[in-house]
Amino acid sequence: MSQDYTPVLIQIVIASGFAVATLIASVMLGKRAMRNTVKDSAYECGMNPTGEGQARFSVKFYLVAMLFVLFDIEVVFLYPWAVVFRENVANAPVYFWGMLGFVFVLFIAYLYALKKGALEWKS
Amino acid sequence: MHDVNTLAWIILLLPLLVAASILFGLKKMPGLSALLSTGSVLITLVCSILLFSATGKAVPVTWISIFEFKVNIGLLVGGDKDPLAKGMMFIVTFIGTLVHIFSLGYMKDDDGKARYFAGLSIFMFSMTGIVLADNLVMMFIFWELVGVSSYILIGHWYNKDSAADAAKKAFLTNRIGDFGFMIGILLVWVLTKQIEFAKFTPEIVANAAKSPLFDIAIIAIFCGAIGKSAQVPLHVWLPDAMEGPTPVSALIHAATMVAAGVFMLARVSALIGASELAATVILWTGAITALVAALMALQQNDIKRILAYSTLSQLGYMVMAQGIAGQGADAGMFHLYTHAFFKALLFLGAGAIIFGCHHEQNIWKMGGLRKKMPFTFWTFAIGTAALIAVPGTSGFFSKEGILHAAHAAGHDFPWVIGLIVAFLTPFYMTRLFIVTFLGKSRTENADHAKEVPQIMFVPLVILAVLALFSAYKPIAKFLQAKGYAHAPEIDPTFGWSLFGLIAGVGLAIWIYKGREKERINIPLFANKFYIDEIYNGLIAIFQDAIAGLLDFIDRFVIDPVVARFPAMTAFTAGSFFRLFQVGNLQGYTFLFGAGVVALIWFLLF
Amino acid sequence: MPVYYLEIIVVVLGLVMLMADAFVKLEDKRNIAWFAVLVLSVVFLLLFKVSWPESTEGSPFWKFYDAEKGSRGFSLFFKGIAVLTTIIVLIMSAEFRGVLLKYTAKPEDGAHPQSGLSEFFTLPVFACAGLMWMASANNLASIFVSLEAVTITFYILVAYMRRNVGSLEAGVKYLILGALSTGFLVYGFTWLFGVTGTMDLAGIKEQLALDSVNVTAALFAFALIIVALGFKVGAAPFQNWIPDVYQGAPTPITAFLSVASKAAGFIVLLRISGCFFGSGDLSEKVGAVFVVLAILTLLFGNLAALPQTNFKRLLAYSSIAHAGFLLMALASPITLVADGKEPPLLDTSIGVIAFYLGAYLLMTLLAFLVMTAVRNQQEDDSLEGYAGLAKRSPFLAFSLLVSMASLAGVPLTAGFFGKFFVFKLAIQNGACGWLIAAGVIGAAAGFYYYFKVIASMFWNAPAEGNDGPIPVSMPAKVVMVLLIIAIFAVGIVPNLILGLIK
């Protein structure tokens, strides 16, 4: 029973390990910066920074990110389909055409996004 | 085509179609509307004649079925056992046709001609609905529709205050009766679980009659007839309704609509037969109406009003007949048929006179019309003869039937009243006749009177023939009426009514021959027993008293206890609930979470 | 034609609309809406022509499609509601374009003057497809997917007027609370799956009826699901979002939310609660929950509406109130009929709810059509803005009169029979006295606040500045007339709707 969950355990270890490993790696590999108030202050006669410290991202960034997620999800559906494809497609071609329809819908969405200029970075 | 179902539906729906098309499209084309309306009623007449020999059964359509309360839109055009609808249908469409034709002339130059004919078509639709209805609910709906169309037509000249008031009065008075009718229908349904006429079998009725409510139910139903057939004490609207165009008076307020009450009583005669109390109430209401109306007719000067009161009086006869079990009901329906012919004739004749005399309605301002309008004179004479029941005319046989039935059933007192009315009727009709047609013209209008256009003759002639002969075998048998002409039995009824006729006519001739103005003056009759004044006074007193009482209750009881308190509670509760609409998201999510916890707690613990 | 083609047609229609907007040069983008109205009308007619499979074997589509003989009529009826609502919402949206563009289009750049409009027409079509699928979803997975297809579309539509603070605020509220409720729904589904081991509703019903079922776990699952669905239909205490979101959303979307979204929520509620009503232990508790929810919703919706002065908010509360009546029908336990005979339609909760929703669709959409026309002329949604409407536009005033009378339940209108059948069902099935009392209080309060609107329209003089005449476009007028006729027709012959269900 518990053996069934071994792949899940491995998945968890890999996922969290990846995050931890990147963090550690960046600390270890990167050159340690010297930080003190003088170094952080504005250069010579520059203005003291005011307002929010966060940089503003262009809305385009979110747009592209969202489109990426959407099209990425497509793959999630394609994997299990590909796994059972061989057994089932011989019995019922609807499995094939169904997935093709799904991809077609996504293609339409892609065309729409393209035509509407969602993927143009500069405007 | 020779199928009852098809014919009945055509008769019912054709007028509706015409009315709708006039109202929604042809308003600007009065000529076409008039022709369309007349044409449609002609077709329905043909259909209703075909109906007599048609075979088959009408197929009902289910309208509502809630609980065991099922209402059909059914058409009851019974077989041989039930000739009621066929005969009535013929009368309605026949008089309707003639009135339409007459109106073509009478309303020729009226501004609201299209509206008028649309109104007539709506009326024809609703009236056929009443006649064909196979259950009480459907009848009630058409009953109301008839009320509406009558309202429209009485108020046709709505610019005239008196017409608008009369229309309102007719409508409101009828509402009182209809309210009773509605309660009656509900009670009957509660008691018998049936609303279809055909289902009132003797067993069901006998079963229901055990309940003490049964008498009340039948009397409540009778209230509908009191309103529609203008019986005392709800008779006040009918004379005022004469404000409408005269053809309308002939069609609706003489021949058909007011007879609907009698027709309805005949339909539920199975129920009436089971309630002795209700039958007695009906009998006496009819008798009193007959007498009171005849007395009031004695002193009227408006030609249409005299005819209106005589209509009331004759309706009293018919209602009285419905109160006599068995033979009486048939005689009453028979009188309805004959009366429809001769009263329509008289009204159309009166219409012709009014038309000829430039809209003069006072009989004392007429006179000498015999020479000016010979044609109208003769037809009117025939109508009068039928109304006063000269032996041999149709009116004689039907009236004799009623009086005879009353005598045979042992209702002596109503019988005597009937005989008194049989004396009064000839008296006031002879008065009307002499003053209008004989002697010399008393005003310029009467002097310049001209005979009416020929299109108006046609209905008059046809009706005159029927007024004379409709009681004889071929016609009466065609109508499938029971109790047609027979050799008069020489019995007290015959003797007394003949005596009444001679005495009435003789007395009237003696008093009014060659007179210029009224010789006798009985304010009580002239003012219609002051009933209108009494009603107005009563209404005023009651209104004040009730208003005062209500005001008191409103101010000191309802307002603080009944209205303020719940209203305040509701408002407070409402405002309290609104507090939950805090408007910010954190608040909502918190409440949402609280709801989830409460729900889970409620379900699991 | 197999019945699932309908959904396919609607989805393809949506795609075509998107492509048309992207690739075809159109002077007036409303043409896209007219095209959609045309196609959807055809779909509506096709509803009467569809065929059902002989068996569900063989085609994988049917596995997710409820093809039981008994529920086919209802599936089609709810699909009809979805299509009809979408058609009217599209017509309303075309009427609403002026207001919409004011808050979406950027006047400064050289884009099409109506840019952003066509998506406003397209998204409801996709929502419609989701609603239609939901009407026949018979599997937890398909229920969830179709429900989310609708909800996500609504997130966008509610916040569509992005330059209007109210619309944005409504969008954010709806998004966050909606996501919260979706979370509960999925969690409930997993518990249900855990208890029964199947996603199929028929299978779930079978499993729940067994004696061995874990009652506590099943009830927990039910509680979670009811939270989410209660949120969707606007049942107290999960109704918080409704007034704010209804007020902020563009008016056609408010109409869409209040009719289609509610109808969808109720059909899912009916299907899932149907599984629980199969077993004795569960059905008692489940029935009790519905009674409590119905009482709360009836009282909240109707009483909180009393002090309202904003018409759009008033309609939001009225929508909660109507959800209360629908829950009342749901709370009346389903009569079990012996001999396996089908009970009469109006003796079942689903029959009454279907009728009520049909009537509700007519009168609510009529009210929102009037509101859209008025909104074109003025910013003001408050009741004062509707004062003297009878003088400004007798036609609109009459339409609103009919709609309000029907919502209040005046006899001879469709709304009367809706309420009548609900009460009849409740009394027939011996519902508890408190529920009926709450229903009566609700109905009475309803009369008050609906007539407040009528009184304001007919007796008050128009407010300063809001007294010009109000033009109504031809398509909107035609739809209104049809709705008025339908309200009266159903009010006189209720069998019209019942016939459609059969």
Image (cartoon, rainbow, N blue to C red):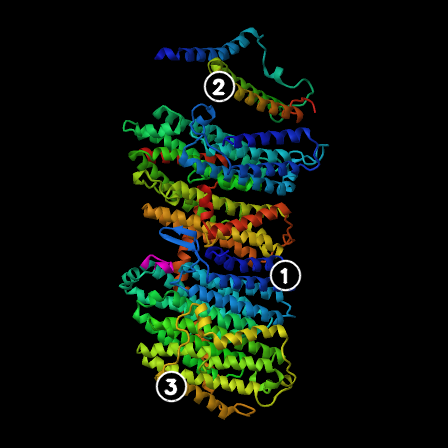
> The magenta stretch spans which residues?
B192-199
What residue is disc 3 on?
B495
User: Judging from the image, what secondary structure is the residue with disc 3 in?
Assistant: helix
Q: CA distance from mark 3 to mark 2?
A: 102 Å
User: Judging from the image, what secondary structure is the residue with disc 2 in?
Assistant: loop
Q: Relative to C452, say whether B33 is above or below.
A: below
Residue B419's x, y, as percent? 39, 83
Residue C42's x, y, as percent? 57, 37
What residue is disc 2 on?
A92
Q: CA distance from mark 3 to mark 1?
A: 56 Å
Q: Relative to B537, say whether C57 is above or below.
A: above
Task: Using the image as rendered, state which of residue B479 and residue B533 is in the foreground.
Answer: B479
Whether B195 is among the magenta residues is: yes
Tell me whether marks 3 and 2 sit on the same chain.
no
Q: Relative to C165, say whether B541 is above or below.
A: below
Q: Which mark is residue B418?
A: none
Write the residue at 44% across / 36% down: C72
Q: Chain of mark 3?
A: B
User: Judging from the image, what secondary structure is the residue with disc 1 in?
Assistant: loop
Q: Amino acid at mark 1?
A: Lys
Q: Amino acid at mark 2?
A: Ala
> Looking at the image, is mark 3 or mark 2 nearer the viewer?
3
Q: Chain of mark 1?
A: B
What residue is disc 1 on?
B27
Write the residue at 35% across / 84% down: B492
Residue B438 is left or right of residue C113, and the answer is left
Q: Residues within 10 Å of mark 3 (few under 14, many from 20)?
A: few
Residue B413 is left or right of residue C63, and the answer is left
Whether B388 is among the magenta residues is: no
- The image quadrant that residue B160 belongs to is bottom right
